[in-house]
Amino acid sequence: MKLTQKQRLKICIVGQFLLLISAIIPTILLANKDSTYYRFGPSTDLIIISIKIDSWTRYCILLLYILIFRICKVFITELTFNIYNPNQKKIKGFTRTELQVLANIMFMLNAIRYAITLQLAIIQIDIAVISGIFDELASIPTIYILLKDKEFIIDDIKKQELYNPILETDEI
């Protein structure tokens, strides 16, 4: 049986959900309750990139920084400079060397950004979760923009049902 793209996508979503649950449950059950990772909000022990986050003002500024950082990341990686597109065989506007150098600069900057955001993700659970939520919120307009120019082809049967919900039959 050959699966459609929609079926494969649904299977991937279910698989991703099961993988997430299989990671969360042992983490919660085996967690060290004295760990600073399971705290919420500012504390005297919360230090990020040598900055003490010990007040709600500093914590909110940190969250605003993370939000801006995540929005920029999503827009830059998805909309601005997508070097790898296996379907595009002809490249316009760049020489091979220019594209190689610019792509390597982008990958290096992404690696540095990743190192910084990794520290944010592993320092405290609330910051990690909020960062993930910010990523997903930033992806909503990005996906909309990417899909806006696409043409969606509906197969003939679905199109007939969509535009003519009452199909005529020989039986009356």
Image: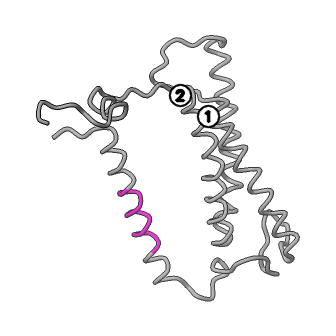
Q: Residue at x 69, y 62 (%)?
A: 119
Would you say residue 22 sits in the magenta stretch?
yes
x and y, in percent, of residue 6 in the image: 34, 41
Image-quadrant location for residue 33: bottom right
Residue 51's place in the image compared with 33, above or below, is: above
The first of marks 2 and 1 along the sequence is 2
Question: What is the three-letter code of the residue carrying label 1?
Answer: Ile
Neighbourhood count class around disc 1 (C-alpha, 10 Å): few under 14, some 14–19, many 20 upward: few
Would you say residue 34 sits in the magenta stretch?
no
Question: What is the three-letter code of the residue carrying label 2?
Answer: Tyr
Q: Residue at x 63, y 88 (%)?
A: 34
Residue extending farthest left: 171
Cα separation between marks 2 and 1: 19 Å
x and y, in percent, of residue 143 in the image: 57, 40
> Which range of residues does the magenta coloring cover?
14-24
Residue 84 circle label = 2
Left or right for 71, reference 43: left
* Kind of element beneath mark 1: helix
Neighbourhood count class around disc 2 (C-alpha, 10 Å): few under 14, some 14–19, many 20 upward: few
* Kind of element beneath mark 2: loop
Left or right for 39, reference 2: right
Residue extending farthest bottom: 34
